[in-house]
Image (cartoon, grey):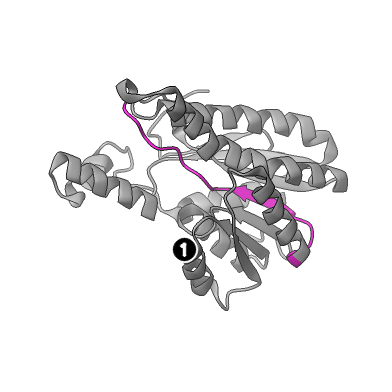
């Protein structure tokens, strides 16, 4: 299927690893120009090396919890490749904290790490898209905002806030030609997940493979998602093939949370 994305400029935050990097690779395969933003220079260097020769791609490092840095990243991307046609937000993740260890600062930190890293990029980009009368935003959020877990309350609250922002911005900017959607992935095979499994294995004094098997045994499809499987949904939502889809929150969780709403 031709997704009709040829020549589009796509900005991917959190683009140096995981789902963001998978998106970058897939957008390049569709003939897009891709700008990546990440926080870690080493990860960015490795990401750009892995994408070399696949198309027009550039990367920049920024702490998106800082609104000024986020604005500089947006302006740098547009100076390089022109107006942003598609924004994929995949940066930031809140630390998991047991409920009895939560302090007010943990809630603040979670909002900074997940909510504001997205808002700081979305705010200037959606306004520029609205002025031009066209654009698409896809936010990678997470099921923690729909299903409360006692070790992810602060992060889940940030995810829930992002879902509301997604739906609200979709309604507000639809008359200006801008679509805004979100995806909520399940456990996905990324470096971040592997790091979490390693910590869990040390705490429980079991092997990483045991932790992974136990996690997979709870999933209806019997396995975790790959970044590419999540990326495929993101590309569809970003494409003109999804031209009447806006304000949607799409679960990419293999029926792990079979919710009606």
Q: Where's residue 147, x and y in %?
A: 42, 25
Per the image, the residue denoted by label 1 is: 43
Observer-nearest residue: 223 or 180? Answer: 180
Q: Where is residue 15, by image quadrant?
A: bottom right
- Give the position of the N terminus as an image quadrant: bottom right
Task: Identify the magenta region.
Answer: 80-98
The mark total stands at: 1
Q: Where's residue 36, x and y in %?
A: 60, 60
Label 1 element class: helix
Observer-nearest residue: 139 or 175? Answer: 139
Q: Residue furthest bottom?
A: 53
Residue at the spot 46% in from the left edge and 66% down from the top edge = 42
Residue 242 appears anywhere in the view: no
Side (left or right) of 181 relative to 48: right
Side (left or right) of 160 relative to 210: right
Work out whether 207 lies above or below 253: below
Work out whether 245 lies above or below 234: above
Residue 120 appears anywhere in the view: yes
Asked whether residue 218 is drawn in magenta, I would say: no
| Magenta part, dominant SS | loop
Asked whether residue 87 is drawn in magenta, I would say: yes
Work out whether 8 lies above or below 54: above
Residue at the spot 34% in from the left edge and 47% down from the top edge = 224
Q: Where's residue 202, x and y in %?
A: 18, 45
Q: Residue furthest left?
A: 205
Q: Residue furthest top?
A: 100
Residue at the spot 39% in from the left edge and 48% down from the top edge = 188
Q: Where's residue 197, x and y in %?
A: 27, 46
Task: Report crowding for label 1: few under 14, some 14 to 19, many 20 or more residues within 10 A (C-alpha).
Answer: some
Residue at the spot 19% in from the left edge and 51% down from the top edge = 209
């Amino acid at each position: 299927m031709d997704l009709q994305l040829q020549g589009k400029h796509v900005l991917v935050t959190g683009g140096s690893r995981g789902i963001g990097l998978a998106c970058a690779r897939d957008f390049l395969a569709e003939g897009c120009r891709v700008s990546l933003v990440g926080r870690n220079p080493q990860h960015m260097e490795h990401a750009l090396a892995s994408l070399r020769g696949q198309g027009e791609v550039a990367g920049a490092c920024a702490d998106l919890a800082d609104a000024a840095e986020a604005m500089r990243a947006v302006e740098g991307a547009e100076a390089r490749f022109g107006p942003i046609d598609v924004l994929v937000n995949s940066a930031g993740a809140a630390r998991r904290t047991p409920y009895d260890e939560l302090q007010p600062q943990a809630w603040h930190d979670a909002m900074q790490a997940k909510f504001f890293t997205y808002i700081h990029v979305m705010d200037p980009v959606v306004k520029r898209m609205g002025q031009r009368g066209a654009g698409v935003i896809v936010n990678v959020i997470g099921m923690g905002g729909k299903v409360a877990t006692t070790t992810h309350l602060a992060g889940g609250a940030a995810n829930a806030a992002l879902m509301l922002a997604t739906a609200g911005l979709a309604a507000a900017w639809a008359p200006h030609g801008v679509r805004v959607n979100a995806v909520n992935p399940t456990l996905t095979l990324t470096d971040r997940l592997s790091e979490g499994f390693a910590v869990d294995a040390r705490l429980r004094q079991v092997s990483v493979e045991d932790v992974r098997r136990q996690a997979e045994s709870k999933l209806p499809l019997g396995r975790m998602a790959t970044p590419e499987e999540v990326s495929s949904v993101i590309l569809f939502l970003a494409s003109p093939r999804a031209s009447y889809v806006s304000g949607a929150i799409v679960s990419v969780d293999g029926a792990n949370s079979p919710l009606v709403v």
